[in-house]
Amino acid sequence: MKLVIVESPHKSDTIGQFLGSGYTVMASKGHIRDLASSGKMGLGVDIDDGFKPTYKISPDKLGLVRQLKSAANKADVVYLATDPDREGEAISWHLAQVLGLDVKTTPRLEFHEITKGAIEKALAHPRTIDMNLVESQETRRIIDRLMGFRLSTLLQKKIKSRSAGRVQSVVLKFIVDREKEIKAFVPVEYWTINDTFGDDKNHTLVADLVSYQGKPVSIPNEKEADRIISELPKEFSVKSVKTVQVKKEPKPPFITSTLQQEAYSLHHFSTAKTASVAQRLYEGEEINGKLTGLITYMRTDSIRLADEFVSVAHDFISDKFGTDYLGYTHKQKADKNVQDAHEAIRPTDITLTPDVVRPFLSRDELILYTLIYDRAVASLMSAKIDSQTTLTLEGNGYDFTTSATKNIFPGYTALYGKYEEKENVNKLPADVKEGDTFTSLEPKKTQHFTKAPSRYNEGTIVKLMKENGIGRPSTYAPTITTLLHRGYVESQKGALVPTEQGILTAEKLEEYFPKYMDAGYTAGMETSLDSIADGKTNRVSLLTDFWDEFQKYYDAADRDMAKVQPKVVEGRVCPKCGKPLVYRKGRYGEFIGCSDYPNCDYIEKEKPTVVTSHVCPKCGAPLVVRKGKLGEFVGCSNYPKCTYMEDMKGNPIVKEKKEVVIPPDAPLCPVCHTGHLIEKTSRYGKKFIGCSNYPKCHYIQKDPNEKPSKRSSTSRYRRSASSK
């Protein structure tokens, strides 16, 4: 028996289907061990012994490790087939260490798509674990532990912030700096002028004032706008009519950052959601009864495409659109931040069009797969060609211009045009020539104000991270998620807005750790880690230099950073000890407690306001004002024994228990197999098909022809059932 170990259980199902009965495929479910929290300062790293790390198997992985050891001992050969990146390489190394496998001889399988051909090719040409990649990942992990643990401990003690990190803190600074820029912005007034023109052939056109006597026009106020309008003549002549051909090349195929940007821009997918859905497409979905990996590896920074894919895609484009639509000009630009370890994100099989896979994917999977498929194919198509005409009218030294664009050849937009903004569809008279006369019909002035820069959203912050070399494809989504979970940033209608605690954290880190808050330093560290991966840099010297300098900053901050004192509740003292009460922050938000904590542990629980003039008509207890999901309401103070409620106008609120009516021909739920699929109505009045066994089963049928996502729905079902 041959054992293949992958990371994901779902991936093991897909690969197991390809390998057959002679193989057993098991999943490590990610890392099986991590740095311990023991030793000096709880770092799990022996700083005095060459930064030697101490690893500990995760408690929740002990049972799994026993199963893996048992299977490995029985196997003739063990193949390590974790993800094809540094993190995956490190997981393979940890598996080899824990399972007692020889690192120098244990076969390591590398593939960038989960298809039968890719797996067979990897089996035919296995390699061994790349220790340079392992050392690079381990060095990153050690640096992140050293910096993260020390900074987090300091910030918790000084300003009650929960954490800091090498990448997350720099990204937080980006967001905070933008917020400060917005608040400091002072709008500047300016005006524009346009005019409607007509000629004796009943042609009309609208043009904008752009220059006076060959110089750009700047109109700072209404008085100046009125002066210019008063000087405009009635008659204008056509100064020039210029037509040029403009080529627009297709965008390259997706890399991790551009996929996350486009998915957010077009569909408002968070970076975490895009990463999760792409992971499912990579690991495989059941297509026509077979588990099939639909896209190549989704953590990449290269726009390179495999020659095999280019060849079959060109055949596909020729058949579907014609040979005139063929093109391929994308080359990876020289960029020190690009690892180029994997090709771009693309479909694994050109014949699996979005229409073919539609019945087998969830709504989100279909949206993202269609985007990836169309972008990859369109990137190999020819340029779009437009004819752009610009017409200039002149009168009394004032030039007005207008332009129009006409498509000559659609090129790649025949497939990808639906994702792009509509361009100028203004039409110009076909027979206009230089010297023709137009009459000014309706000059208009419009007031404007310059606008502050926009806040970052998840898409633009990923773009900024990529441009500055901050982090790597695998870290974009986790970094944003961490900032949100730590309460440093809030998402307000899609915009990332720093909280007070986030601003305080960024300011203190910038004051006391300026070097590590600089994007250039963080990008330089990524380059150094790449150098370790290439075998060019000694990691001990890198760690030594980092630690010696970091400790100097840390010691100064520990000595000089003032401890933020909690805000005092005016006019109130602790009923237990008489010391002032203060506002504190806890896991569940702000609360009032004693300033003498931990000597006095008094905490004031928020009490509902008593409605003194009313009592509960059911039990006679006082009524109180409470807050619910939909706002304030009046309820019995004897809750939960008494559940009486009324609205703020005194009208009783009666919750009617709706009886679930299941039609005799209702099909069984494909997830829990105990409920039935019935028509329901959402709180917004929208009709949908869902499981009658809700809330035990959360399955919702998005489309009548859709196959349910077994993993997501089943996991929700099991989680709900087990919690009860």
Image (cartoon, grey):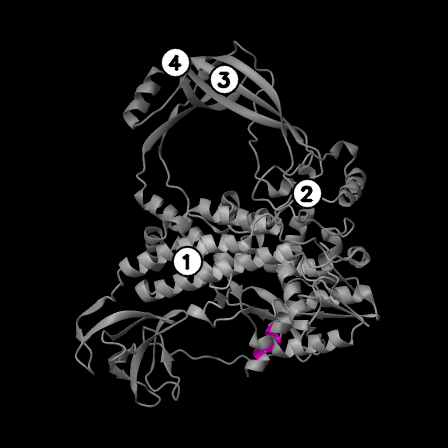
- Residue at point 35%, 63% (across, down): 154
- Give above or below for 506 relative to 691: above
Q: Position of residue 222 (x, y in %)?
A: 30, 27
Q: Dot 3: what SS?
A: strand
Q: Position of residue 121 (x, y in %)?
A: 80, 55
- Residue 470 is tagged as none
Q: Earlier in the sequence, mark 4 or mark 1?
A: 4
The type of residue carrying mark 2 is Arg
Query: Is 718 part of what is drawn in magenta?
Result: yes
Q: Which sits earlier in the primary sequence, circle 3 or circle 2?
A: 2
Amino acid type for the residue under numbered disc 3: Thr
- Per the image, the residue denoted by label 3 is 392
Of callouts 4 and 3, which one flags the residue occurring earlier in the amino acid sequence?
A: 4
Q: Nearer the viewer, residue 567 or 417?
A: 567
Q: Kindly identify which residue carries mark 4.
A: 233
Type of secondary structure dominating the magenta stretch:
helix
Q: Gap in Å between the C-alphas at discs 4 and 2?
A: 57 Å
Badge 1 or badge 3: first in the primary sequence: 3
